[in-house]
Image (cartoon, helix red, strand yellow):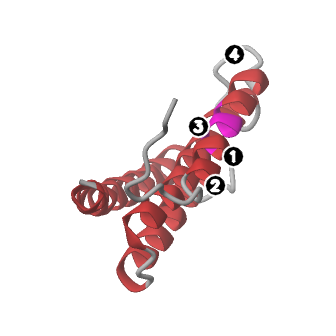
Amino acid sequence: RLHSIARVSLVLGTVALFFTTMGVFLGMIWAEREWGRYWAWDSKEVGGLSVVIWLACYLIAHRFFKNGARGVLAISMLGNIVVSLAWFWPQGNGLHQYGAANTSIMLAAAVLVNLAFFAIGFVPAGRGRTMRG
């Protein structure tokens, strides 16, 4: 079952990389028309680029490093952290301020929950053992 989930993760990661890359490039075209430059190193732009880089690294790791399904799914939890940081971190600063409330608590909670699941992914699986009361 984990292998089928890992295969789905590979397909969805590929689709996500394609659409995120397209979003970053289309955003660059829009920024050039609106502001006269393609890239301003704004926090939203850097966040989008971080997600693209993470997805590329994830797909490379998925393809070349055979850590098994548990390893692949465990490192995918790090992707959740990257996306959380890319989404929530720039909400209150940069060129695109949306008047969002302080998201530090939500961001810290999201990162901690994902780190907990990441750590759980490295706990050895009990093969055939059952708990006896």
Residue at 39% x, 60% y: name it: 21
CB contact under 8 Å: marks 2 and 1:
yes
CB contact under 8 Å: marks 1 and 3:
no
| Residue 33 visible at all | yes
What's the amino acid at mark 2?
Val
First reached walking from the N terminus: tag 4 or tag 2: 2
Q: Nearer the viewer, mark 3 or mark 4?
A: 3
Task: Using the image as rendered, state which of residue 132 and residue 30 is in the foreground.
Answer: 132
Q: In the rendering, which numbered label is found on residue 99?
A: 4
Q: Which residue does the numbered mark 3 point to in the structure image?
A: 87
Q: CA distance from mark 4 to mark 1?
A: 15 Å
Q: CA distance from mark 2 to mark 1?
A: 5 Å
What's the amino acid at mark 1?
Ser
Q: Which residue does the numbered mark 2 point to in the structure image?
A: 46
Q: In the rendering, which numbered label is found on residue 34?
A: none
Residue 111 belongs to magenta span: yes
First reached walking from the N terminus: tag 4 or tag 1: 1
Determine the secondary structure under disc 4: loop
First reached walking from the N terminus: tag 3 or tag 4: 3
Q: CA distance from mark 3 to mark 2?
A: 11 Å
Give the magenta range: 110-114
Residue at the front extreme of this rendering: 133
45 with respect to 108 (left or right): left
Determine the secondary structure under disc 1: helix
Q: Nearer the viewer, mark 3 or mark 2?
A: 3
First reached walking from the N terminus: tag 3 or tag 2: 2
